[in-house]
Image: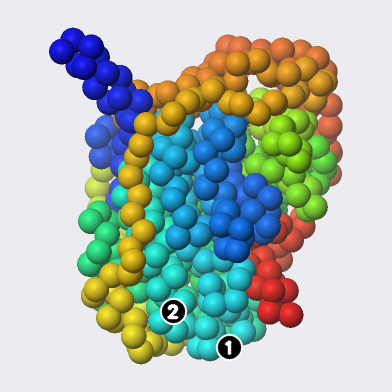
Amino acid sequence: MLVQSALVALGATLAAAVPTLVAKDNYFVNPKTGNRFQIVGVAYQPGGSAGYNPELKVDPLSDKDICLRDAALLQVLGVNAIRVYNLNPDLNHDECASIFNAAGMYMLLDVNSPLVGESLTSWNPWESYYASYLNRTFAVVEAFKDYPNTLAFFSGNEVMNNEETAATVPPYSRAVTRDIKNYIKKRGGRAIPVGYSAADVREILFDSFNYFQCAEDGKADDLSHADLFALNSYSWCGAASFKTAGYDVLVSGFKDSSVPIFYSEYGCNTPSPRIFTEVGAIYGPEMTDVFSGGVMYEYTQEANNYGLVDIHDDGSITLRPDYYALKGQFAKLDFKTIQGVKPPTGAAPKPPICEPKLITTKGFNNNFTLPVLPPGAEEIIDGGVKPAPKGKLVTPSTLTVKYKVKNTDGSELKNLQVKQLADDQINEPGLNSAEVVAPTGTTTTTGPGSSTSSSSQSSSSNAAIKTGVVGLPAFAMGALALAAVAL
């Protein structure tokens, strides 16, 4: 009996879960502590677009050994969230979701993919808004809604990226948000936030924000009202500053938001290697009253040169200089203070009423009458996706990484593993103290007071304000990816 009790206790410890967060007014909040939550995230799509292949039955969260390898390295950085772009709802994700949960990390999940029929198109959006497409988005919700570390769903990613697309897309994109929220309300069990990830195109950014955050009656119970608004921004390059990167304009433009605001992508790759000086600003006093952190783009090195690590054909990894630089910047943060802030007392901002005067850009769609559900979609919402993919936390079979991981100097990390965090514990620097060797050969560990590596790369040039997307990251231009597939 004692042995059985011990095994039960061990299993409970291994299956411990991060606290389920809520979107309350304009912040993410941990309901158990009452504290605000700041996203310290990394975009996670190993293999790029090829990492999602329905024919080969693979996606970024389908291989537990790969997830374990990457969760350990992200845990060392102090990451508490990952954004995953392309997922196959027909696969089982229990092991990977449980591994990232064990490492104290949340999942921000896109419901779309670049494949035809799996995303709302930027051109003639009414042609891609049909029941089978919505069924696919609902299936992603079904597959991930029961994991406690599912933080939010993105109903769209940069579907609007210029004034031309802003003329036709907004009602359809907002309708997808409405439909997913309606599905969750009827089928989801808990209220999981749904929102939009926008391109930082300043000509349309704040009109996009107003279009998504407004409510028909000025109340947040409007199902088409987004629960969050995020942006993919690459305006801070090298040794820029709060003002030269235009962060001051963003803070001013979003200061009265009724929903949480955060970076769904950041990390300009000029200069390269990157130095990530924007980290101090994102989690500093000038921004945290308005922003709820951000997601650095991206974990794996692809052709676009934004990676923290190189993945080799045998599954082994070599850390890149960017990894050490980001680690050093995260290590400077006082996480206890950053994650220990209570939401302000008093009345929170209310969503504005949806009306044409909210829109200031000529040509931007100011019609808030949304398209009705396409034929067959209402039946799916009422009856649920069939068969419905279901997810649940499981006890990982191991927390020790089997793949080799090497520092830039060629030395191998020994005994790399995910550190199982306690129930309701969220990751931060120092919790996984695996040692890495910086490019200079200096040993660095995470956590306050520890030594950190310094990058030899710096830049005195200030970043200009970008009106488009810098560098065209693989997933930052979802519409272009879709167009390429269509061609």
Q: Quadrant of the N terminus?
A: top left
Q: Is residue 277 visible?
A: yes
**Which mark lies nearer to you, 2 or 1?**
2
In terms of depth relative to the viewer, which is nearer, 378 or 345? 378
Q: Secondary structure at mark 1?
A: loop
Q: Quadrant of the C terminus?
A: bottom right
Alpha carbon separation for disc pair 2 and 1: 17 Å
The crowding category of the residue bearing disc 2, from other C-alpha atoms within 10 Å (few below 14, some 14 to 19, many at least 20), is some
Looking at the picture, the colour scheme in use is: rainbow
Q: In this image, 438 relative to 264: left or right?
A: right
Pick whichever of labels 2 and 1 is earlier in the sequence.
Answer: 1
Q: Secondary structure at mark 2?
A: helix
Percent of width and height locating residue 402: 61, 26
* Residue lying at 50% horizontally and 59% vertically, measured from the top left: 88
Amino acid type shown at disc 1: Asn
Q: Residue 383, relative to residue 324: is it above or below? A: below
Percent of width and height locating residue 361: 57, 80
Q: In this image, 148 relative to 322: left or right?
A: left
Q: In this image, 405 relative to 101: left or right?
A: right
Disc 2 designates what residue? 132
Disc 1 designates what residue? 124
In terms of depth relative to the viewer, which is nearer, 427 or 378? 378
* Residue lying at 25% horizontally and 54% vertically, measured from the top left: 190
The crowding category of the residue bearing disc 1, from other C-alpha atoms within 10 Å (few below 14, some 14 to 19, many at least 20), is few
* Residue lying at 27% horizontally and 59% vertically, measured from the top left: 188
Query: Tag count in the figure?
Result: 2
Quadrant of the rendered structure where residue 132 is?
bottom left
Percent of width and height locating residue 261: 46, 53
Q: In this image, 216 relative to 295: left or right?
A: left
Q: Residue 297, relative to residue 459: is it above or below? A: below
